[in-house]
Image (cartoon, rainbow, N blue to C red):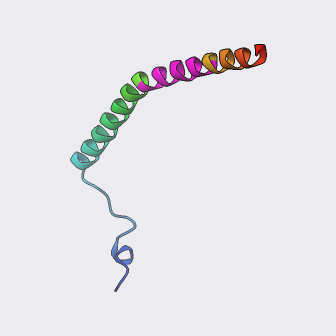
Amino acid sequence: MGDNFDELDDMATAPEHLKGMLTSEIDMIRDAMQIVQMFLGETMVAGVKLLQELESKNNDNDLKV
């Protein structure tokens, strides 16, 4: 089995329309990840803070007993 990477030309260039399509695809993925982070990121922060508050209240109740 030969190594396929040996056959690639180091100086090969992609057509301009392909570069544009690839850049557009990367931008779409980046935008989608920002939207996901916006919704999940804030929810995760709020959830962690809630758990921390519940844990501290639970620890305060344990100390009183």
- Residue 49 forms part of the magenta stretch: yes
* Residue at image location 73% in from the left, 15% down from the top: 60
The part of the chain drawn in magenta is 40-52
Quarter holding the N terminus is bottom left
The part of the image, by quadrant, that contains residue 56 is: top right
- In this rendering, is residue 28 above or below 51? below
The part of the image, by quadrant, that contains residue 35 is: top left
Q: Residue 11: horizontal and vertical position, in percent?
A: 38, 64
Instruction: State the residue in front, 63 or 49.
Output: 63
Instruction: State the residue in front, 44 or 34.
Output: 44
Question: Magenta: predominant secondary structure element?
Answer: helix
Q: Residue 21: horizontal and vertical position, in percent?
A: 24, 43
* Residue at image location 47% in from the left, 25% down from the top: 41
Would residue 63 appear left or right of 1 to someone viewing this image? Answer: right
Q: Residue 16: horizontal and vertical position, in percent?
A: 25, 47
* Residue at image location 51% in from the left, 21% down from the top: 47
Instruction: State the residue in front, 48 or 30.
Output: 48
Would residue 43 appear left or right of 61 to someone viewing this image? Answer: left
- In this rendering, is residue 17 above or below 51? below
Quarter holding the C terminus is top right
- Residue 13 forms part of the magenta stretch: no
Would residue 59 appear left or right of 13 to someone viewing this image? Answer: right
* Residue at image location 34% in from the left, 76% down from the top: 4
- In this rendering, is residue 36 above or below 10? above
* Direction front: furthest residue: 65
* Direction left: furthest residue: 17
- In this rendering, is residue 7 above or below 15? below
